[in-house]
Image: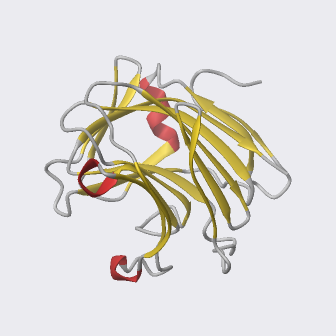
Amino acid sequence: MLCACGGRKATDDGSVESYWADFSSPEEMNNWKCYDSGKWEIRDGWLVCDARQTSSTRSILWLSRILPPSVQLEFEAECLDKPGEILCFLGGDGQSYSGYEITVGGQGNKRVAVYKSAKDGDESAHERLGRENFKLDRERAYAIKLRKYRGSFRVYVNGDLLVSVSDEKPIEDSAHRYFGFSTVGNLVRFDNLKIERKF
């Protein structure tokens, strides 16, 4: 049975069949881990991040649950400071800058994009898989949906498909099966995370 605080069902390989969190309880933070200096907390039913004072200006909060190779994620996100830099990671190692970075309102609130990072976390090894024009508004909640099937990605914002890309050499090893929320130098909040395995 799913619950409001980190509900989940697992498969035989340890990956989640489904996971849901509405961040109504501080106990949900027990399911997440931040490895940098970003400040993450649950406030008024939202997961809130203040990454404006981190040493690298970027912060990632990793869910400590293994994801299946093909998965759909949905969540809401809102910028409380400047508009832009709503980010998340798929297929990461759960500890460092790794996997695929999905940016909404990135590069000065200009783009929606999917980037593939090096497995060793080298930011200079970015490979852009797709890019489209898009701007966020401050203090407006956006519904974001991600669909990953092996090396194919689809990014929806408020129901509109904005990016559809494929990686010819996808990151598929068992160590890179985690999801993380993120932002760069911004105050953002997230809510209503829903994860479902897709076949």
Q: As displayed, is residue 23 above or below residue 67?
A: above
Point 52% across, 68% down: residue: 99
**Nearest the camera: 62 or 116?**
116
Point 73% across, 60% down: residue: 69
Q: As displayed, is residue 62 above or below residue 123?
A: above
**Nearest the camera: 144 or 91?**
144
Q: Quadrant of residue 49?
A: top left
The image shows a total of numbered marks equal to 0
Residue 38's spot in the image, x, y percent?
Answer: 26, 50
Residue found at the far front of this picture: 133
**Nearest the camera: 21 or 35?**
21
Residue 24's spot in the image, x, y percent?
Answer: 47, 19
47 sits left or right of 56 in the view: right
**Nearest the camera: 161 or 60?**
161
Residue 107's spot in the image, x, y percent?
Answer: 28, 58
Point 39% across, 25% down: residue: 141
- If the image is split into quadrants, where does the N terminus sit? top right
Q: As displayed, is residue 118 above or below residue 197?
A: below
8 sits left or right of 26 in the view: right
